Amino acid sequence: MKQTNSPKVLQGTVGEGLEQRGITRREFLKFCTALTAMLALPPSMASVMAEAIAKARRQSVIWLSFQECTGCTESITRSHSPTLETLIFDLISLDYHHTLQAASAEAAELARTQAMQENAGKYLLVVDGSIPMGDPGYSTIAGISNYDMLIETAKGAAAIVAVGTCATYGGLPKADPNPTGAVAVSDIIKDKPIINVPGCPPIPVVMTGVLAHFLTFGSIPELDDLGRPKSFYGETIHDRCYRRPFYDQGKFAQTFDDEAARMGWCLFKLGCKGPVTYNACATTKWNDGTSFPIQSGHGCIGCSEPNFWDAGPLYKALSMPVSATASMLGAAAVAGAAAGVAITWHNRSTKASAKAAHEKVTPQELLREDK
Amino acid sequence: MSATLAKGINSFKEVIDTPIASFFSSCVHCGLCAEACLFYTETGDAKYTPIRKLEPLRRVWQQEYTLLGKLGKTLGLSKPVTDAELEAWEPLVYDSCTLCGRCAMVCPVGNDLTYMIRKMREGMAASGHAPEDLVGATTRAVTIGSPMGIKWPAVLAQIKHVQNETGIEVPVEKEGADYLVLMSSMEIINFPEYLSALSRIFKQTGVSWTLAQDAFEATNSGIQIGASDLAREIVSRIVVAAERLKVKCVISPECGHAFTALRWEGPNLIGRPFRFEVKHILEVLDELHTAGRLKTKGKDKRPLTYHDPCQIARRGGVVEQPRRLLNEVASDFREMPDAGVMNWCCGGGGGVSANSRAEPLRLQVFKHKKEQIEATGTQTLITACANCRIVMEEGLEHHHMKVEVIGLTELLAQYLVEDNTP
């Protein structure tokens, strides 16, 4: 019988829980192998991961949502049951999550403080949404400002996973003119390991992959200079894009409905930000590996990069200037052309005088008198 | 009147054009060209990195044609190119570059390094830093008419010999013929089989052709040494003869650089388009074969392989034609690794074989060709360049290899269907 009600609470270890749900060891190993591959770990790590996860007690996770749109939560839950992604929900004990928890009012807050006490120093804190630094009243939960709640909850956390571009870099709330004074988690918390999982929203399997890594190794995966796991954010969309050969051949769609667009040519000129966006969309894809924006005919908007909303119009090619005005560009073009003419004229005269100085070479002149 | 440093530097300034300026400014210093160069891969010496061979020319470009370079030169921060420097570069530019163009194929920004070396040699020659042997060959080509000092009587003797052997008349100075046939000195002296094979093939295919008394030599030492004034004079002889005899097409022989000199450099040297076509002999034979005029019978049973001459395949675009012809007369044709446009040079092109100083290096780098041949397991090597042929024959002998080298035209003639009824 397929269960359709809210996720069942499982006791004991993850292994027991999986057994109760009728998940075989073979299925579980397949799941671990897939995760190992995604995390770019050696194949031998699959069984290690399976051992570790099976024996682990379900990891306590507290999920805080601040200035956000619930898209990240939608993303992690929006996966067809029963997929690998829903399984991972049974690997953790999600002790507090506004959107998903049944409890409300004081009971809800009690769940959070209880989990914090029982698992002090061990729980994993997941944050989505940015934190307003302007007026604390811009965003509160149970009368507690986002800032206070983050400081209080982060104190006993083993590590923090910032999920979504708002929590990782400020995201849409931070877009110019940033009315709420929104900042990222890493702008406030400096003494805890933070894993940034950006994206608007992030790919579900990237979120579950990071959690699995933490569960297996008790440590955070290797991160890049922006705090992102290298295994998922190591390469640009462009480098992994199936339309890349068209870019290399200079074949571009000029409008969304031209022949080139129908032929599936590169969307660079229509504003695709794939070349500067580090994410796994082109390989992992969305909706159970079905597709990703470029595959459905729209350029990448670069949603997993810092300040993407202010990085220029979504439909302007990356090579087009974003801030200069037409008159500035005109003046620059005139100045450039003038300098070009001057240099060309000078170089031409250098070459012309060299030509004038050319003495016809005869066989005798191939030898040196002084040699 | 002699070569001077000032003339050389002036020549550098003169040859730097838009392509060279953009090549130098777009070089990303990746060093990929080194791995493509025979002289680097076989010696492991970084001084043979192709782009480094152009360093004096690059410095002149920087000092004369770039803003920062001019400033540096004015302030005395960058020193002018000296005679000592050009002397040190002479072996790099002439002995260890065959103008094979393999480096240009791998350059990620598309720099044509061969084009640059060719232009740089103009300044090297004008400053008196060209190898002695090349100076000698060029002088003979201009004054006598052939780099090896061959005159028309020697060709005439050759013609008589061929006529006696084949019983076919070799047409000379025949006005209105379709094709003007050229030869290389190497073919006149070392490989008379070429002329004999050609007259038999042309007789069977009914091609009207001729030789010209004052333009039998296809090679162009002016191109190899890098003296456009002399190259122009040499190529003009062919142009004058071809237009005098009103031929439709001039056939470049089995020689690599002769094809480059006539087909690509020729019209640029004389400053106007030719009034005739230029084709390599393999192109002509392939056309005759495709048209069904060139018929062969039987196939060579020996396992054999084909060496692509750089100027004909990589720089000349004649790649498919020899394969089509070979498959017609060979039952066991085997490609060597990297065959086609990425083939490795024999090591003696671009004037290197005419330069005795370069001989030890040339024999050393032949190792690569040796390995390529060995990989095919064949003992018969076909090619379409008399220079490649002599260089490889010397290399094979030096490395004690029992491999026979044959020209493709000659091989085709062996299997020609001959109808000798008058």
Image (cartoon, coloured by chain):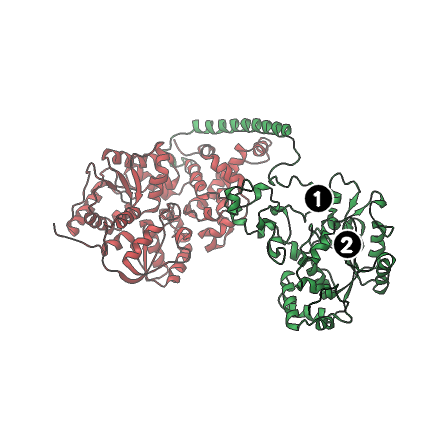
Among the 4 quarters of the image, the one containing residue A46: bottom right
Q: Which label lies toward us, 2 or 1?
A: 2
Question: What residue is drawn where x is 54% and y is 34%?
Answer: B63
Nearest to N terminus: mark 2 or mark 1 = 2
Q: Are marks 2 and 1 on the same chain?
A: yes
Q: In terms of depth relative to the viewer, which is nearer, B5 or A185?
A: A185
- Amino acid under disc 1: Asn
Q: Can the viewer see residue A148 in this picture?
A: yes
- Amino acid under disc 2: Val
In the rendered image of the structure, the colour used to display chain B is red
Q: Which mark is residue A127?
A: 2
**Chain of the residue under the numbered disc 2 shown in the image:** A
Number of numbered discs on residues? 2
Q: In terms of depth relative to the viewer, which is nearer, B305 or B420?
A: B420
Q: Can the viewer see residue A364 in this picture?
A: no
Among the 4 quarters of the image, the one containing residue B127: top left
Q: Alpha-carbon neighbours of circle 1 within 10 Å: few (<14), some, or many (≥20)?
A: some
Position of residue A153 relative to residue A318, above or below, is below
Residue that numbered label 1 is attached to: A307
* Chain in green on the image: A
Circle 1 — which element?
A: loop
Residue A354: x and y in percent read 46, 29
Residue A78 as seen in the image, left or right of residue A114? left
**Chain of the residue under the numbered disc 1 shown in the image:** A
